[in-house]
Image: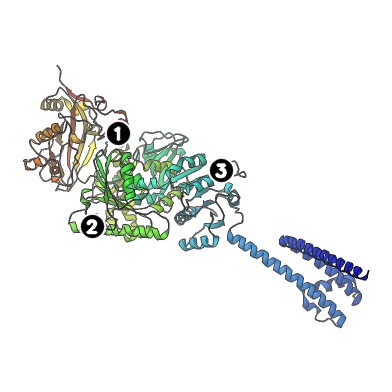
Amino acid sequence: MQITLASGNTSRLKNDNKILKYICSYIKYKFDNLFAHGLIFIIPLLTIISVFIILIFSIIYYYTEGADDYEDALWRTFTRILDPCAAAEDEGLKHRIISGIVILCGLVIVAILIGAIVTFMDEKLNELRKGHTTVIEKNHTIILGWSPKIFDIINELIIANENQRNPSIVILTSKENSEVEYMIKDKINNSRNTRIIYRNGNPMSINDLNKLSLDQARSIMILAAEINNPDVRIIKTILAIRNNPRRNNINFHIVAEIKERINLEAAMIAGGDEALFVYADEIIARIIAQSCRQSGLSVILTTLLSFQSDEIYFKHESALVGRTFYDAVFSYNKCSVIGLMLSDGTVKIFPRLNTKINVDDQIIVIAEDDDKIILSSDYLLRINNEYSGSTSSSLINHNTVLLSNPMTRKATKRIERNLLLGWNNKAPLIAKELDTYVARSSELHILTNSDTITQFINEQLVNELTEQKIFVHSGSLTNKSDLEKLNLFSYDYVMLLANEESEQQNLIEEADAECLICLLYLKNIVDKSNNEKTFSIVAEMYDIHNCQLANRTCADDFIVSPNLISKYISQLSENKNIKKVYDVLLTADGPEIYLCLASMFVPLETPISYYQVLQETLKYQCLAIGYRLMKYLHDETRFFGIVLNPDKQEQIIFSQNDKIIILAENFMSSAPNSTHILNIEQLLAVNRDKLHGNVIGKIAAELEGIDCVRIWHDQALIKEPFAKPTSWHFDVTYWSFTSLHAISVWIALDDSTLENGCMYFMPDSHKVIERRYYESNNTFSEIKIGKNMADIFAIYPELKQMPTVAVPMKAGSASFHSGHLIHGANANMTPGRRPAMTIQMMPDNTVFNAKQNILTKEQMDKLEIGVSTFNDDNYNPILYKKIK
């Protein structure tokens, strides 16, 4: 029995210990859970404990120390908990023991409280550093994602925000906030009045997006990450923004970057009318295709896209309602009006001058800032033709421009031979863009050392081009011997692309270094040839700082693609309508930016007001927006000589080779040899019968032995001062019909002499061309006006021994020559122009042969090869018809 009882007591004791341990563990668990709530629990708990200790020990003080009243005992206990020094004067062991206990309790409570506060503050600071708190901002700009373009974008936004009140930029990225802040502060020295707020999170997460006050944002930019197929994440981010259950009934202003065209349609479906998409490769391809033809275009676009310079604005101008676009052009001193945005949102760049401005229309202007768009104080006098400036040079007869038939310097597509050095994702887009600028049978030569790229070109790209033949050359950008084999002087335009496209800094530097080496080799090849560089070079680079290293190479223009796209995205974030403007300016259809010789419009070395420049350009159906002074070509501080939106009262002196920057459609921007003005009878404002008359038509008919003569087209040929010779060629090979009875008349408007570039002919050469025509199944060999007089002999070697005849002519004299007679013109060795006029004529019932020549795209679309005839009297009127 005793053994049993002992065993039972032991068992009961073990059970009691287990229960006790469980109770302790339970209390500890609950206590830990309560402490996990942080200060919200600790402060009330410590307050309760403190009150309990004060009440207990105040009673002890009251009865042991003989306090005068209980309030005095409470105060003694309270002060000893908070301040141990308060017990310094206590006497007696009992009193000191009690005070010591109170002080120890106070120290524990205060220590716990301080520790809790420090922990709480540390957690809050970590939370802030990690960027997990909610942003409470209004009218802010949000950037989602991370890309090296972010630095240029932030810089542009900082400039744009200078006149804003309390502006801010909020960045949400998966990168650590400390890393993001360090990189941005390293690249951006001064954020001026703009606050930059960093948040860490996933742009595709609705919860993370909710921290950014999306509904209050001015705009949202989504950058493409450096991963494979970033478009998927961009589309998902847009869906997260638009389908957020917390969103208000407002339209978001979203600008997103898309890497692949194949994803563009899906992105547009996801974004609806709230998102704009920037397909960077296509934009850069268009700029490269245009820049190789217009040296300086990249500087103009960079200036227009930067908030630091003059840029494009939209404005309702009630004072101009009911007026014409022409009136608007002359209504501002310090703004350049370039178009209208109609009430339905349609953008018209350089519309017809008599276009009326309606109530809801907005004018599109280039201005320094939106607060600078101010009507001139005397704008009514100007547009009512009552203005008289302080000098005669300011006086403008606007009706001369508005009422006279405008002249057209129209560019005809010509056969070109172009060279593409290197390859990246933009190369196929550039090739397709070039296809819209060149005539059929043009050539595109590509240098690459990749078998994969060569296979893609031969199997796919060749089938996507209609006007160009592709020739692939195997070689490297950085191999001089490969470049020397290309015969650079045989090309019209050379485009240099970086072989690798990556936004990783080391690969950017490597790609730019290859371009720099290539440019150095090209310069060396040109210098050693002792020939004048007859081709233009446009080079693409990724880092704007590397362009400074290449300024003294032979490149005519640099395209810094990431910088341009960053500026473009920034502009769209401020005004979505900007996209409509550049959609017009960066396509072959519609008005484009051209840099034209100033001598095409105004006299040289003579002071002239910008008002007069504007008037003179309007006469040629083009609109001046600035000019370029070539003496500052290499001066970066003067924007390489480019001045946009000058004051209209400014006096300018243009020199040889200076340019006027214009907006025009299908304009012939430069004329190294001659200036062509089509439809000259409109310029002279006389009736076709009086200009051409039956005399010219009858002579042409009798010379060709035909009964009916129609006009193909007519033009003025103005050989500029000191212009180069026009090499040997014949006309009919360029025209949109094939006939052995085409004929031209050449009329001297001033004396045409040996010194100023008179015509030369090759008698009987038409017989050689005719014989070859029959041998080639009634077709003419495809040729172009070569850079050298002897180029034609490579195709027609039998012409090399034929005699030539110079034909000087007095003003008013005329000569007729067959459309397949070889002819050319001497160089103009004088400081004056050599003006002449030609009329190209053809028989009745000529058939379309697929060549574009002077035809517009709309006309081309309506014509059927081998079937359609040029018998429309509106376009090709009858000049003479024999009466039977």
Secondary structure, mark 2, is helix
- Residue identifier under label 2: 481
Secondary structure, mark 3, is helix
Q: Is residue 703 left or right of residue 398?
A: left
- Spatial CA distance of label 2 from label 1 is 42 Å
Secondary structure, mark 1, is loop
- Residue identifier under label 3: 242
Q: Front-most of 605 and 53?
A: 53
Q: Is residue 70 left or right of residue 242?
A: right
Q: Is residue 735 left or right of residue 115?
A: left
Relative image position of residue 146 (x, y in whole percent): 49, 55
Residue that lies at the very extreme toward the bottom in this rendered image = 92
Q: Is residue 403 above or below residue 276?
A: above
Q: Are marks 3 and 1 in contact (CB under 8 Å)?
A: no
On the image, which quarter does residue 766 sit in? top left
- Density class for disc 2 (Cα within 10 Å; few <14, some 14-19, many ≥20) is few
State whether residue 650 appears in this view.
no
Relative image position of residue 755 (x, y in whole percent): 11, 46
- Residue identifier under label 1: 856
